[in-house]
Image (cartoon, helix red, strand yellow):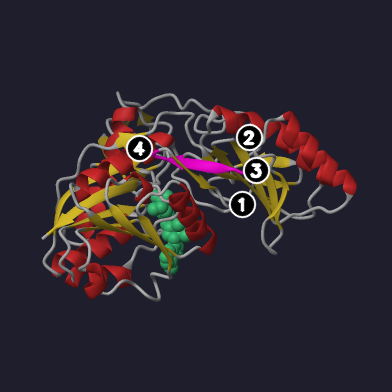
Amino acid sequence: MSLIVRVAARGDGVAEDGRHVPFAAPGDTLTDAGELVPGPHHQQPPCRHFPECGGCQLQHLDDEAYAAFVQDRVTSALDAQGLTAPVRPALLSPPNTRRRATLHFDKGLLGFAAEKSHAIVDMRECHILAPELLALVAPLRSLLQRLRPKRRADVHLTLTDQGPEVLVTGFAPGGLAAHEAITAFAQTHGVARFALDDGMGPETRWEPEPVTVTFAGTPVPFPPHGFLQATQEGEAALVAAVREAVGPARAVADLFAGLGTFALTLPAKVYAAEGARDAALALKSAANARQRPVFVEHRDLYRRPLTATELDRFDAVVLDPPRAGAREQAAALAACKVGAIAYVSCNPSSLARDAKTLTDGGWRIDWVQPVGQFRWSTHVELAARFSR
Ligand SMILES: C[S@@+](CC[C@H](N)C(=O)[O-])C[C@H]1O[C@@H](n2cnc3c(N)ncnc32)[C@H](O)[C@@H]1O
C-alpha cells in the first residue's frame, strides 16, 4: 500500500514510494496490486469530456487539493532555484467563469484539443467556460459546418463589454453567402464582434459598436488578438496583489502592460511599456480619453529592456511578461534602486529563474500569491512582491 502524497506539475499523483499515478488525488491509496482506492480529496469529475479533453487535467481533485496543487507548483518552482518565500494560499476562480478560450474546428468538430493528441474533443458541455461563451459553441459548430474550412481553424472566444467576440484564425471565407451567414449568426447570437484572420491580419465582418474592455471604469478599445486575464476573479486577485505590492508608490512603471489591466487600476502616475502596437495604441487612446495619468510607450522589452538608470526614475515596477519570462529585464531590475517590484507571471518556472536573478542582485521575495484562474488545469499564475 502506498499513499498518494502530492500532485506533480503535469497532473499525475505521486505516491510515497515515488510512483507516478495518473488521475490520483492526495489521500488516495495505491494497493500492492496497483489498484487506486479514492480518498477524501478525490471528487467525481463534473464533465463527461474529462479526462479526454485537454481543457482540464485535474477535475478529479476537490477544491482543497486543487488549491494545494496550485500553491505547491509555485513553492516547487522556487525550490528548484534554491529559493524560499512565504507562498500564500491559492485564490481559485469559480467554475464557468472563463471569459477567454481558444477552441479548434476540424471535420465538423468544435472543442478543445484532446489532452494527449491533436484530435478535437467535440464540446457538448464545459464547466470552465462562462455561460455566454458556452452558449455560442453549438451554433458556431453549425455555422462552421456550413462554411466548411478546408483545414483546421482556431476559434478564439473573448467576453468583452459588448458581449462575446469571435475571432476565427486559419480561415477567411469570401463571397456573399459566407458573409451573410456570418452576419446572421452574429446578429442572432448577440455577438459583439466577428473577425477572421487567415494570416493576413484580422478582418472584421461584424462589429455594430466598437468593442471594449473596461479597467477601473476606463473602457479600452479591444483589438482582435488582444490580451485579457482569463477570468474576472483572476484579474481582480492579480490587481489586488499588484496594488498591495506597489503600496503608496507615486510613480510606477508597468512593463508588458497590455491593454492596461494594471496601469489603469493603480492610483499613481504610470509609465506603461507594451510590445504589441495595437494594444499600446488602444491603451494610449483610452487613457487620453479619460485623462488618466498613463504615459504609454510602444517598446520591445526583450530587445530593449529598461535600463537600471531608466528604472530608477520610478518608485515601483510592475511586470507581467509572457510565459518565457523577462530574463533581460530582470537583469536590469536586479541592478536598479526602485522601492518594490510586483512580478505577475503565468509560468512559475520562468518567474523562479528571474527571481533568482533578482535575489542574486540583493532583492528578497516578500510574498507570493498563487492564482488559479485556469481552474482544473495545470496552468498556474501568480503575483510576487520583491523589495530590497
Ligand atoms: C501576460 S500579457 C500581460 C498583459 C497585461 N499586463 C495584462 O495583465 O492584461 C503579456 C504582454 O506582454 C506583451 N509582450 C510580449 N512580448 C513583448 C515584448 N517583447 N516587449 C514588450 N511587450 C511584450 C504582450 O503583447 C502582452 O500584452
Residue for badge 2: 123
Considering only order in the chain, which callout, 4 or 1, is on the residue closer to the N terminus? 1
Labels in figure, total? 4
Query: Which residue: 24% across, 68% down?
Result: 311
The segment highlighted magenta reads: 210-216
Label disc, if present, on residue 166 of the rendered structure: 3
Choose mark 2 or mark 3, whichever is in front: 3
Mark 3 and mark 4: Cα distance apart in space? 24 Å
Q: Is the residue indicated by label 2 positioned so its CB lies within 8 Å of ligand 1?
A: no
Closer to us: 2 or 346: 346
Considering only order in the chain, which callout, 2 or 4, is on the residue closer to the N terminus? 2
Residue for badge 1: 118
Considering only order in the chain, which callout, 3 or 2, is on the residue closer to the N terminus? 2
Considering only order in the chain, which callout, 2 or 1, is on the residue closer to the N terminus? 1
Mark 2 and mark 3: Cα distance apart in space? 16 Å
Residue for badge 4: 236
Spot occupied by residue 99 in the image (x, y as percentages of width and height): 51, 37
Element type at mark 3: strand
Choose mark 4 or mark 2, whichever is in front: 4
Spot occupied by residue 94 in the image (x, y as percentages of width and height): 40, 29
Callouts 3 and 4 close, C-beta under 8 Å? no
Mark 3 and mark 1: Cα distance apart in space? 22 Å
| Residue 336, magenta (yes or no) | no
